Image (spheres, rainbow, N blue to C red):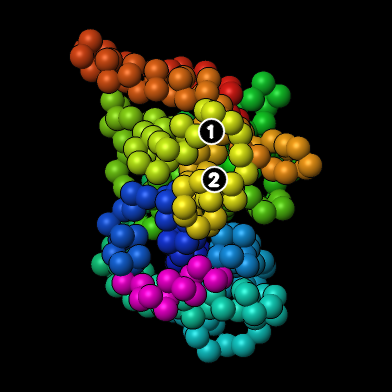
Amino acid sequence: MGYFPVLDAALGLRQAYDFVRFQPFNPLMEACAGRLSAGDRARVEATGETTRGWLGVIEALLDPGDVGLMGLEEGLLRLEQAPGGPLEIAGSSLAGARPLLAQVLRTDLAPETSRRARHLLEATEAIARGIRKDGLWDYVLGRSDRVRRARNGELEFRIKPELRVREEDLQRVIVMPSLMVSRQMAFWKSGGTLLLYVSMAAPLPVDGPPESLLLSAMAVGDRTRLRMLRHLAERSCTNLEMAELLGVNPSTASRHFKLFKDAGFVELREGEGGRSEYELASGAIVAALDAIAGYIASGRQGSPTWNARAAIGASHDQTL
């Protein structure tokens, strides 16, 4: 447990790569993305295409002895000067991430961590207190409604591809406050390691909308995505077919589909000839829109105890 700036920089670049899925950004992330030059953005894109959307970079950073769990100064030194290490030997695709990571560390995170050193320490201590008080899994459940406990005791994370975690299968859990994360909590599992990024933002108010409702609202709050859902209501299609239908790049359509998967609005199934087709999960959309309406109505009815988890339960059951 602690603050690990290199891992935070990697998350920032992952969010910049998959920007449709992770917007709206927090102010620091927005500033970081805005400072990327056209050449930087091209390198972010190229690295993302060869590393599973930067997840391969995060995975490499978690290897024992790598820079992921180092402090700011030591991490910068390793990234900018020292040869070797998993990022170097894993191939050019991962090695190409090093200058971008160093740039985000030096330009964005170095001044911010210096300015907010006390807040980072307080956030780390608050996470530790919460885990000691509630236990790790109840703490995680309390931070994000995109996680729930299944009947068999597994934790189910509302993420695609589906992520299920059993405590006995984990060898290491890394919990860190994050200056970059766009959501209340982001999570990544690699082998026996579970990485949890916890937002530095103030906790949501009691009557604040849960993240699942925000994801649902984002999924329908865009002209292109509404057109995509309308086409899917007529028939299932592949990512390439949707891109051709809309006149956009396949990578653009893919980013929109990733947001739909996070919101539970589509399912991926095997079509004719083994093609992977996206199918509309119309029941999940209806449940999500009903939950949004229920949240809004609860304020009019003076009902501050509105249960977000119960209201979105139907959508969870269909999408996890």
Q: Which mark is residue 232?
A: 1
Report if residue 38 lies within the magenta region: yes
Q: Position of residue 82 (x, y in %)?
A: 57, 88
Q: Is residue 5 left or right of residue 150?
A: left
- Please say if 159 is above or below 230: below
Is 39 above or below relative to 146?
Answer: below
Rendering coords of residue 166 (x, y %): 70, 37
Q: Which mark is residue 134?
A: none
Q: Which residue is mark 2?
A: 242
- Separation of marks 1 and 2 at Cα, in angstroms: 9 Å
From the viewer's perspective, tell me whether residue 209 is left or right of residue 265.
left
The correct choice, above or below, for 152 with respect to 191 in the image is above
Q: In the rendered structure, which segment of residues is drawn in magenta?
A: 35-47
Q: Label 1 crowding class (10 Å Cα cut-off): few <14, some 14-19, many 20+?
A: some
User: Callout 1: helix, strand or loop?
Assistant: helix
Residue in the foreground of this view, choosing between 196 and 180: 180
Q: Residue furthest top?
A: 301
Can you see residue 278? yes
In percent of the image, x 62 and y 44: which residue is there? 238
Residue 229 at x, y percent in the picture: 47, 34
Q: Is residue 204 above or below residue 128?
A: above
Q: Secondary structure at mark 2?
A: helix
Secondary structure that dominates the magenta span: helix
**285 or 106, nearer to the observer:** 285
Extreme-right residue of the structure: 273
Q: Amino acid at mark 2?
A: Met
